[in-house]
Amino acid sequence: MNEDFDLSRFMLLVKNCSSFFDGFLNKIADGMDISAPEARTLLLLNDNPELDSAFKIVNSGPPVSKSYVSKAVSGLASKKLITLTKDENDKRIQHIKLTEAAEPIIKQLSEARDRLICFLVEEVTEEEKDLLTSIMKKVEEKAKKLKSLT
């Protein structure tokens, strides 16, 4: 292994980016009458339609706790930004669907997120972005394999 590569530093970078993104979402969400977890959940649901239940979000999406998702889903439902429908086969599962009322909020959140990402990578070349994407996909695949073994 390359001695310059420090996995713990990489993991800390990922954690810090996530914390930074949460702080960024806090500031954006404040002006929208939603919480940062609600904002993150709206973006997650919009970007990943296959994650249509809290169970799927907790188990398949980014690392978030059950209570984080539960609070966000409850808040979004009370604000009529999502609808919840019980699963026909398993009544413990509620399917989540974004409502039309969520669309302008998601648009604002997506635009703000895109501006942030553009700022963060403005000095990164297209080749470097392609390489980073390729590396992230490989790491993600390995992580999925590891998760399936545990």
Image (cartoon, rainbow, N blue to C red):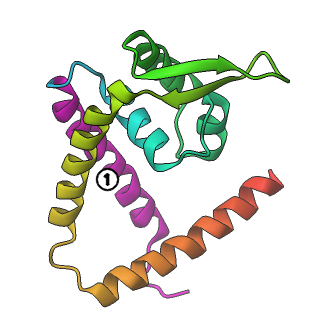
Q: Is residue 3 left or right of residue 113?
A: right
- Helix, strand, or loop for circle 1? helix
> Is residue 82 rendered magenta in the image?
no
Region rendered in magenta? 1-30
Kindly give the residue lying farthest to the right in the view shown.
89
Find residue 129 and report its image quarter. Answer: bottom left
| Image coords of residue 67 (percent x, y) | 54, 20
Along the line of sight, which residue is nearer the eye, 93 or 7?
93
| Image coords of residue 3 (percent x, y) | 46, 85
Along the line of sight, which residue is nearer the eye, 8 or 20?
20
Badge 1 crowding class, 10 Å Cα cut-off, few under 14, some 14 to 19, many 20 or more, is few
Q: Which residue is mark 1?
A: 17
Look at the picture and state if 62 lies above or below 118: above
Is residue 4 at least partly visible in the picture? no
Quarter of the figure with the N terminus? bottom right
Q: Is residue 102 left or right of residue 58?
A: left
Q: Amino acid at mark 1?
A: Cys
Along the line of sight, which residue is nearer the eye, 80 or 3?
80
Along the line of sight, which residue is nearer the eye, 9 or 49?
49
